[in-house]
Amino acid sequence: MSELIKQTLKSSNQTDPELSDLFDDDTEDAGSLMSAVYLVLEDNMSVQGAMDHVRNQSLEKNIDEISYILVVDSEGILKGGLNVSQLVISEPTEMITSVMYPDIISVSADTDQEQCALIMEKYNLLTLAVTDSYGRLEGIVKIEDMIDVFQDEATEDMYKMVGVDEEEKILGPFLTSVKGRFPWLFVNLITAGLAAMVIIVFESTLTKVIALAAFLPVIAGQGGIVGTQTLTLMVRSMALEEISHEDTKKLLIKELSLGLVHGFVLGLIAGIVAYFWQENIYLSLVIGFSMMGNLAVAGISGVALPIFLRAMKLDPALSSAVVVTTVTDVVGFLIYLGMATLVINLII
Amino acid sequence: MSELIKQTLKSSNQTDPELSDLFDDDTEDAGSLMSAVYLVLEDNMSVQGAMDHVRNQSLEKNIDEISYILVVDSEGILKGGLNVSQLVISEPTEMITSVMYPDIISVSADTDQEQCALIMEKYNLLTLAVTDSYGRLEGIVKIEDMIDVFQDEATEDMYKMVGVDEEEKILGPFLTSVKGRFPWLFVNLITAGLAAMVIIVFESTLTKVIALAAFLPVIAGQGGIVGTQTLTLMVRSMALEEISHEDTKKLLIKELSLGLVHGFVLGLIAGIVAYFWQENIYLSLVIGFSMMGNLAVAGISGVALPIFLRAMKLDPALSSAVVVTTVTDVVGFLIYLGMATLVINLII
């Protein structure tokens, strides 16, 4: 029986190479993590028969680590499973079907690895059965192999957010690092150009009140941090499936409110400091209101960008920190210098 | 025997509450993850005796999931372990000591959870024994409970880097979010004030050539991204123990070189764009060189900050993105506006 399973497993891996090239992330499914099953029980065995089978197979195939054993019928269809200790503690004359768990959670070979990880975590499984469309056992995913997936998914999200290639090792080759990081730096150069253009547009305002320039990094910095905080929470919560599409409105309202509250307090502080420096209430008001506006936009874009990326079937983490900080730079400067221009005669 | 173990386990948890209050992160060690051991074997048992013991104990205590069984001597000292399947496949007359693995990796109750996770991952363990200083078995850590640790550690690093409380849930209470995020926003407000002061110092330079202001967000943005990229790689690699103290020099050289190379290429592009706009070669040179300088500093601080934090016995992830982006803002503006001031007569 186990030979049959191994055979099935082998043949299911022999896909057309041309075809599998089309899916370049096909290393990311259950099939690629799957181990062959060397030992299964049949559903017509008794406990004693099962123990004999386990003993013979173990000796023959030199297996000494068995914890969970799956049970299939004569067609190879998955019927249940049991912990090997169940054999030890049950009456030898009982039937396997009466001591096994009949309801076994299984996935198919093309189930996403992250999905498998979530199922194993949710149901506290040490092994996860992989079946084909007929319910035939194809293999198992072991929790030991899954640990790496958990680690890799987290690493991937962290790296992608800041535009680093998910495979990069910090001690890896120099050119690999350049290849992975440069593209997003270049994208950021172009988007930073947008922020530069906003400044150019308001050049005459800046010339009139050069003190305005001092608060540019404050507006940009605060917006960047708020946006990245929201974004990080969003990306991680989406990865752990703690939030779903239905939460979008609630999330937007919460992060918008947080942005406004933080913006009010921080804008107030910055405005007061500015007043002691320039003694112009209108400058302080411009600083305060643009802080509020920018942090509100930062919160909203931190929520909206990963949701938008997922809707576009892209990874929500995809270099999103690079994009969000640009949005907050551009919008922050627009609000700040725009408002300053409107009241420029009161500030001079 | 198992009662004795449970007793030991229980008593070892009864520490002075006053004392344990001193260590507010004592939920982060092996002890807090540890499960009681309800079933152990003694080293003087035969395989048959062990099977009888397992059967009796399972029925008595209603245990039906056993995979790995630990073996202790009459004093409760850990002697070895074996997979339950080993009982099934061995001769009933053999001694437990001859079929068990004698070398069992164990940790103590105060071993850090992250350390336990790394050991379990490295040796592919499903359970990890916890012993006291005499080698007596205190309990076990199961891989199911460890999965959450892996997830939490990754989440923690991501959140801490951007100054979000590690416990925050994005759908959690509003005030919890404010309490977690505001402190680092406030810190960033103060540090952004440093960047503002650099601009104030060079106010007269900016007044003379207002075009200089346009490149402030470009210098700051690029420095911020490079610093955060390096930082993210560092924090994650440190968490996964892929790098150690001995690599510091190599890392500094690599990230410094990367910063210089990226700075050269991106500075060249920015300089050329600036030349087409202002037709002043000295302005372009100032932009190009300050980009190189800032990205070199960004790379170095991305390596140095987490190493410094760990040396201070702090978490390397601790709001480090907030700090690194400030460093790059301040240093970037200093280099950029400083150089511009030196050659101001050539730029006007």
Image (cartoon, coloured by chain):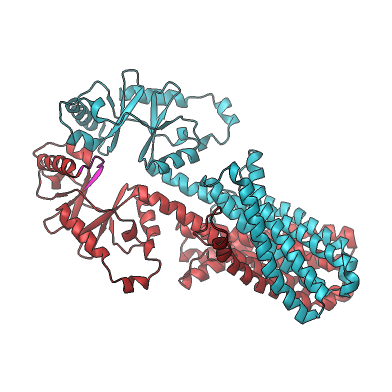
Chain colours: A cyan, B red
Residue A131, given in percent of the width and then of the height, sits at: 41, 27
Left or right: residue B77 compared with residue A77: left
Is A188 drawn above or below residue A345 in the view shown?
Answer: above
Query: Which corner quadrant holds the N terminus of chain A?
Result: top left
In-front residue for pair B65/A53 = B65
Is A222 drawn above or below residue A108 in the view shown?
Answer: below
Q: Is residue B125 shown in magenta?
A: no
Residue A314, given in percent of the width and then of the height, sits at: 63, 41
* Residue found at x 19% / y 59%: B7
Residue B238, given in percent of the width and then of the height, sits at: 48, 60
Left or right: residue B16 compared with residue B268: left
Where residue B90 sits, quadrant-wise, is top left
Is A213 drawn above or below residue B112 in the view shown?
Answer: below
Q: Is residue B63 shown in magenta?
A: yes
Looking at the rendered structure, the number of numbered marks drawn on it comes to 0
Residue B287, given in percent of the width and then of the height, sits at: 79, 65
Where residue A312 sits, quadrant-wise, is top right
* Residue found at x 68% / y 69%: A266
Left or right: residue B101 compared with residue A177: left
Where residue B115 sits, quadrant-wise, is bottom left
> What is the chief secondary structure element of the magenta stretch?
loop
Can residue A129 be seen here? The reply is yes
Query: Which corner quadrant holds the C terminus of chain A?
Result: bottom right
In-front residue for pair B185/A313 = B185
Can residue B259 be seen here? The reply is no
* Residue found at x 76% / y 66%: A289
Left or right: residue B134 compared with residue A328: left
Residue stretch in magenta: B62-69
